[in-house]
Amino acid sequence: MNVDLTKPIFNDEDKAREWLEASRWPNGPACPHCGSVGVLRLGGKAHRPGLFQCRDCRGQFTVRTGQVMERSHIPLAKWVLGFHLMAASKKGMSAHQLHRMLNVTYKNAWFMAHRIREAMADSNPAPIGGEGKVVEADEAHHGRIETPIPSAQRKGRPYLKRDLSKQKRPVVALVERGGEVRAFHMPHVTAENVREALVKHADRKSRRHTDESNLLGFNWSSQHLSALIAAPHQELRRAFSNRASCAASR
Ligand SMILES: [Zn+2]
């Protein structure tokens, strides 16, 4: 997906609002409170731009109402640019990068990144895998644990294990071979928890593979998984960019 940064919708607040209204309501605005199409655009200096009033329920709304932009003071043009950047970025985009590119505070960028990712998520995901397909489970460790557990023996100082992987946050990913990846943060990676995630997210008919950590009591090796262990980030990023490009082309 290409982003033409010179487009006025990325700089002009009115153009951005028009673009959002046209994409949300291609057949004319409808009230998000009651669904009525009998709505009135409130103009003039007394009202903020983009405000509508419903003739049926008398409720007021803008294009932000009920959307990820709701209750934020971030300009719509920045939101529109944020959507395009997040969707077009091949490797996903961090809140810090949004902060630098959109010229908003880091706090605002963090808020936007969360809301946009939330909007990209499939609200009713179908189970991955299926008959004849292989679903693999793997754990990786990423980032530092925020709250190391204090130790009574060490006068309240945290006990840090020598094994560096134990000081990081565990992430478990379920991978359909040649398909979707779903990754979760799991505070305690146990066979029980991984089984729970598999039951929830994977089709029962799929075959399951795990790596050498033997999470499910199986001990099948798989070349694909060793590649995943070597480069978990690339895999996750690829999954994210696939999903983002799907969301953008919809
Ligand atoms: Zn209404």
Image (cartoon, rainbow, N blue to C red):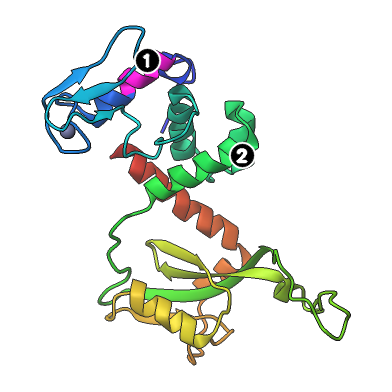
Residue drawn at the location 54% of the way across and 46% of the way down: 91
| Rendered image: mark on residue 15 | 1
- Say if 137 sits above or below 34 in the image: below
* Residue picked out by circle 2: 107
Mark 2 residue's CB less than 8 Å from ligand 1: no
Q: Are marks 2 and 1 in contact (CB under 8 Å)?
A: no
Mark 1 residue's CB less than 8 Å from ligand 1: no
Give the extent of the magenta segment: 13-19
- Say if 172 sits above or below 125 in the image: below
Image coordinates of residue 180 in percent, x first then y, are 38, 61
Q: Quadrant of residue 206?
A: bottom left
Image coordinates of residue 225 in percent, x first then y, are 53, 73
Q: Amino acid at mark 1?
A: Lys
The foreground one among 223 and 153 is 153
Image coordinates of residue 177 in percent, x first then y, are 40, 68
Question: Furthest-right residue in view?
Answer: 155
Residue drawn at the location 28% of the way across and 29% of the way down: 61
- Tell me, yes or no, if residue 159 can be seen here: yes
